[in-house]
Image (cartoon, coloured by chain):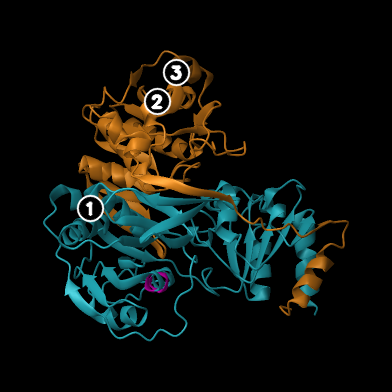
Amino acid sequence: MNVVVCVKQIPDPAEPGDLDPETKTLKREGKLILDESDSYGVEMALQLVDNAGEGEVTLISMAPNEEVSGLRTALAMGAAKAILISDPALAGSDALTTAKVLAAAAKRVEGADLILTATESSDGYTGTVPEQLAAVLDLPSVTFAKEVEVGDGAVKVRRQTEAGFNDVECPLPAVVSVTAGVVEPRYPSFKGIMAAKSKPVENLTVADLGLDASQVGWAGAGQEIIDIAKAPAREAGEIIEDEGEAFQSVVDYLANLKII
Amino acid sequence: MSVSTIWVYTDLTQPEEGHGEPTSTTLELLAKASELADTVVAVVGGSGDSLAATLGAHGASKVLATGDLTGRLPGPPLAAAMADAIAADAPDAILFGTSYDGRDVAARLSVRLDAPVITNIVELNEVDGALVGVEPVFGGNTNVTTKFTGSTPGIFLVRPKSFAAAESPSGDAATVEALAVPELGAVGAAKVTNIHVEETEGPSLDDAAIVVAGGRGMGDAEKFQAVEDLAKLLGAAPGASRAIVDAGWVPYSYQVGQTGKVVKPDVYIAAGISGATQHLVGMKGAKHIIAINKDAEAPIFSVADLGIVGDVHKVLPKLIEAIQSR
């Protein structure tokens, strides 16, 4: 069972985000880490390969500045190898372009039975790349998987819905996006971290993928930001330190609103 | 100038064929589309006849319906059918509510048309005869307005509760036209084998006037009960942060946030919730926000009208008792 996991390397969410006023893109200058949302996909892939008794997990990431820190984290968890697509021409790429780039890379992985992704990234949260990826690859897909089982050339998924969940069966090969909590991600062991340093990371450019610079980045995005404005901030109200009586302020507040 | 034609993808409340009503988000989009465009068309994955009256009342003059799609995921068939129809007669823009199915269809359609999608839209404006979308970034402190530069229809994924549905819907019933779904092969081979609707008691999180939500600060699943107790006492819907849904303390239906529900109640009480961006996005629109958290630096306090810095396990029981004894 060979599983491909598309992961994103993002600025640490604990640091406040910033837009570059020149390019109007998210600043991604500092170190990039593995998006926590992707730890679930990586873990799921590792478990599926373990259960199958053979096969391997290949990671794919599109990142600026040939960033590999996040990939090394996932390799330390147990993935076998990675493909990193890094190219200045990709700056400003939108979700659709990202899907095309990831798809071109995925096509290079031989014998991939299943492609896993998160449902959305923690920094962009557009949430369309997994399904766009499937569409570019002309594969069936199931998004928002909260449970995943593989057997008999198909994947069985419990898919999150607004009303509860659906059970879905999908023949392989397929793309599945997994929700947080689908599995408990392992912490990389020291041995894993050491091994990760020498696991292969193939570096590809846009040209290596057979794509044209005009199809990607700002040139290929088909959209333009025409305004950036500070939103009116919701003002913070009163803050009280509890010394045993603060509950009363809540009671009074609710009473004032005629709720109690 | 106004926009000529907008298509609105119709999400239905009940997944089973013939039992669905358009979701409130769909009605919100129909209202906004009616304001912006001369012609509004509703797209339905399923049978359109039973929906023509409601969709028409809310502004659609036409319904394009695929017919029964029971057992199929909507992404591949709807995207293929819509792409074919667009090749014959393209709208200026297509609006999707941000729902599980809406995202899938919008994403697949974007690939079919080779057209970008812009997401997390909270406002739509007309600029020079075209629609532009406004998206809040960085937890909502910055609004980014984006326009499409190509000639394909603009595809927008809009957040729930961005607009108001028509208060007195009064349009005529829409005409219904068939939307042909082509043969798909393997790409459409996923099969829905079971539909499970979660039972919930009490007011639904979507419409409740009051929401009491708990986060990791509640400690464990058992201690979360205090949140449920307070909710019941106030006739409120209980809610939760993503962290505790992931941890399995409460079902996903409780989740408020970026993924999960966007709520706009009159009162939102956040107990033991730090206020990560993911969560704030789901509740910042509440009229009144009360937060209880032991960390004075917790981001939730930046949006709270009343913030209590304290231990939820001390504050909540006293709060509950005080309300009970009134």
Where does the magenta region start and end? Answer: B30-34
Q: Disc 3 marks which amino acid?
A: Ala
Q: Give the secondary structure at mark 3.
A: helix
Of A148 and B46, which appears nearest the observer? B46
**Residue labelled with disc 3:** A196
Marks 2 & 3 on one chain: yes
Q: Disc 2 marks which amino acid?
A: Pro
Chain that is coloured orange in the picture: A
Residue A171: image tag: none
Mark 1 — on which chain does it sit? B
Q: Residue at x 78, y 76 (%)?
A: A256
Q: Disc 1 marks which amino acid?
A: Ala
Query: Circle 3: is it few (<14), some (14-19), or many (20+) Cα within 10 Å?
Result: many
Most common SS among magenta residues:
helix
**Residue labelled with disc 1:** B190
Q: Give the secondary structure at mark 1.
A: loop
Q: Is residue A2 visible?
A: no
Asked if B17 appears above or below A12 in the picture, the reply is below
Asked if A180 appears above or below B15 in the picture, the reply is above
State the quadrant of the C terminus of chain B.
bottom right
Query: Circle 1: is it few (<14), some (14-19), or many (20+) Cα within 10 Å?
Result: many
Q: Does A164 sit left or right of B286 as displayed?
A: left
Residue A88: image tag: 2
